[in-house]
Image (tube, coloured by chain):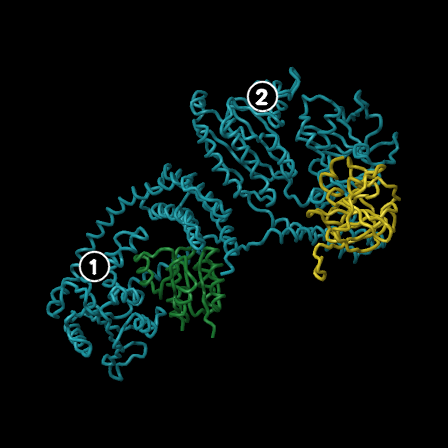
Chain colours: A cyan, B yellow, C green
Amino acid sequence: MELGDEIRDIFFLECADLLAELNGKLADIQGGASDVEDLNAVFRAVHSIKGGAGSFDLPDLVGFAHIFENVLDLLRSGKAEIDDEVTELLLQSADILTDLVEWSQSGTEIDPDSYKPTLSALEAYESSKKSDDDADAEIEDFVFAPMALDIGGPGPIDLPDLGLPLEPTPTAGLTLKFAPSAALYKAGLNAFRLLEDLMEAGAQDLQLHDDGLPDRDAFDPQEVYLYWTMRFPPDVARSTVEDLLFFAADKCELEFTEEALPAAPPPLPDLPLPDLSEAVTGAAAEAVTEAEISVPDLPSLGDPVDDPEGKETGETGTAQSEADQPANGGEPSEGDEVKAEKADDATKKAAAASTRKAPPATIRVVLDKIDRLINQVGELVITQAMLDETITEAGLERDPTVMSTINDFRQLTIDIQESVMAIRAQPIRSLFQRMGRVVRESAQKVGKNAKLVLDGEFTEVDNTIIESLGDPLTHMLRNAVDHGLEKPDRRAEVGKSEVGEVRLSAAHRGGKVVIEVADDGAGVNREKVRSIAEEKGLIEPGSIMSDAEIDNILFMPGFSTADSVSTLSGRGVGMDVVKRSIQDIGGKVVIRSTPGEGSCITITLPLTLAILDGMLVRVGKETLVLPLTSIVETILVSPKSIHGMGTGGRMVDVRGSLLPLIDLAGQLGFETDRAADAPTVVVIVEADGQRWCALQVDAIIDQRQVVIKSLEENFGHVDSISAATILGDGRLALIIDTEQLSDLMVSRLTEQPSTEPKKELAHG
Amino acid sequence: MGETGEETNRAEFVTFTVGEQRFCIDIMSLREIRGWSPATPLPDTPDYVLGVVNLRGTVLPIIDLAERFGLPGAEPNARSIIMITNVDGKLAGLLADSVSDIITIDPSEVQAAPNYKEDSRSMYVAGLVARDDEMIGLVSLPDVVGHQALVAA
Amino acid sequence: MTIKVLAIDDSRTIRSLMNATLTDAGFDSCIAEDGVDGLAKMEDFAPDVIITDLNMPNLDGFGVIDGVRNHPVHGSCPVLVLTTESSTELKTRARDAGATGWIVKPFDRDRLVGAINRVAG
């Protein structure tokens, strides 16, 4: 089918969801907060991956998922107990499954050795539990065996009377009486279709018998009174016929008669049958029971068919129960009871399903479509602003009718914008859950014990932000395990639990997303950091630095601690790269550390990358946007409060504290008509969560949400500018990167490499 | 082009004038031609980057070709035109004085670019083509609007 | 008349495959993602054949079969069980519940179409 590729894509999309579900539930199970439903969900996820993979010729994936599923099946059916050991195995298997899916998707050649150890561990676990299981099965067999004898008891006695050989003769031909019951039609089966199938399989001498028809009075139109007889040539195995009729077997009367080879040739089809049916009616019990007369033959003839199936699926002992089944299913009363019970079961299940909180219905949308929608809403916001201006220009801003409509329109625009943004927001859970593996593997590699504790996984974050957080978070967690946590013996010495804890949390705080990576390790070894930094020429020897400043040296380019280069570090990726990638998505990174108690890296991110709450200011002829989130306050400053510095920089005295003053016009090369001796508007912004600086502007215009338009898309990065936005008149306004601006300014003011990572500016 | 022509190597070019000189660019790189509208200046960028404009929601830079080529150019005015080009998926607007013509050029016609002494045209002109007693400079767009070329001040 | 097939599976991949295969084979197809959804869709869609997965959340395949068989209108609608397992035990359970037939995943188009045609009408 041509649709293959498309469905393949769907498969991998689904795999991603299933793996997220799998990892989520496994995390719950690991945390001890699991119930049977969790195990069922985990089982289903693996089962669905296997089922889908089967359609795409992915043997490694199918094979691994199969064993994984078997182990999960043992657990969910209670044949094996959940313990730490098996949980670890499940987590590991989920990791492998994730890899296999990824490799299958990218078409990477899969090295079986990469998953063999885990596969073997799963197989070993399965067979260890399976052997217990087999013992159970054997006991079951013993329970069933006497029953089989009971039922079969009359059989062997009757059979010799019928003159049928006990030993099945391979060359025997087969005769079949097929008497459908009403139940057959109720199960959606059709006697004529079945007859067609039987004919196709080689049935000959098909005869319809109406001798079962009752008198007119006793006739029930819902009942089936007709039956057929037919004969099969010797090469048709009984098992073949039974397979054909498998789904009908309990809904009709089936009588197989083996003909001895030397028996009379065809022309006597009626003869053996009446004999048999006489024998049947003679045996007071219902006709159906007599069908079981043939049951003793089943194991010998049936085995070769059932066995391979049993082996294929790893089922054991099914051949026996299969042989028993017709006996149980054949008794109408018992069968009905069973059904009634099941119907009851189903109702209960349905009821349970409806009371359980159903997950809200979802649809899958290509991200491009949402991006387009977001862009269009952006245009709408701009058009709205343009309309405002037009109305003001037309002098209509006092017309109550116009303004009321405009206000409605404005509110609606804001609502639409928020709704659209909400579409792209999703819980950070999926990303967080991926981190469990990072911690696990890192800890394993460096011989430490670590557990990851998640908090606030349901915090909703813009999808694009989540995507760009993967690498930085991975690195931070590796770092926390590698450099933050102590070795188990060291932890024991200082009286901590041997298992180190890394806490990953997310929360909305003041219009931003705050993500923290905290460990309960030794904290930053400031002396060591300082000496390394001095050694590497990152800071001036002997310079006076605060603890926080020393801690943040970790983010300086070219810095790397750890006594030895472990397998984790030494990848040429430092925390400076982490900082840069966070900054690239409009975030900030700060580290706090307490010796002996651990470190905490705080990432502050915007809620979305598409919209920004901004303050519009005028500088010369240009309109600029300052992110509202970085603004502390705006004040009017008299020239007296501005002090020149030796280096040419200026400071402004704000209620007694001196802040570096940046003249935006001068800094950005814009002309300004500002009078030197007039009071000046100053916007105080915060950088790095601690440093303040003052931005001098000509006027404050407005506060509003602006749509962020990338400069990088068609141009490139511009120092101190994070992006652009479109104003009401269609013109562009630049959005100021206050962080970078103040970095730049501070370094110019002080010219001291000790306080600011200068190298970063070069990247600017 | 060449859906109609037998010679598939022939290509169509748009000619335009900058500082009284004629140049041309491959028509396949040209998205549209617009009138001049003021650009928002960018800090710390070369002089030939006039700034950025909004084209139906997309932000793109405007390059002053005269400045880029080191030719005397007039201030952008109402008659100036902006050629919106697409080079490797990146859009840019090129400021020129006017657009004149569409010409078909066979590769065999292209002569080696001369060594302009007094300006920086040689960096951006890949070759010359003679038309109507005039030499038309074949502009190498990647060199003019290439990402690196613009950002590196 | 076009045969109407209701396919119930919790795997999006299988649903898409089913839908593509069924539509391509000229059937009128309706897709449901679990047993509850399937039984609900049966009411409006009035399928000629139902194909259901066994292992599903909310209501599994056995629940679907029971739901169909106890339905006053669609009670005798053929129900084919679609599953990765070919275990006789499951097969027997499905039969006892009232299933009409059995298709093993991954299914190929011909087998699927054959199975549907066999039980439809």
At a point 88% along the width and 48% down the height, the residue shown is B77
Along the line of sight, the residue nearer the viewer: A656 or A748:
A748
Give SS at disc 1.
helix
Bin the neighbour count of mark 2 within 10 Å (Cα to Cα): few under 14, some 14-19, many 20 and up.
Answer: many
Quadrant that contains the N terminus of chain B: bottom right
Looking at the image, is mark 2 or mark 1 nearer the viewer? 1
Question: Is residue A751 left or right of A604 when viewed as pictured?
Answer: right
Residue A350 in picture, x, y percent from top left: 41, 58
Residue A697, picture quadrant: top right
Residue A620 in picture, x, y percent from top left: 84, 38
Instruction: Read off the residue under disc 2.
Output: A529
Along the line of sight, the residue nearer the viewer: B62 or A159:
B62
Quadrant that contains the C terminus of chain B: top right
The amino acid sitting under disc 2 is Val
Along the line of sight, the residue nearer the viewer: A442 or A348:
A442
Residue A282, picture quadrant: bottom left
The amino acid sitting under disc 1 is Pro
**Which disc number belongs to residue A299?**
1
Does the residue at mark 2 contact the one at mark 1 (Cβ under 8 Å)?
Answer: no
Asked whether the viewer can see residue A732, the reply is no
Host chain of mark 2: A
Asked whether the viewer can see residue A6, the reply is yes
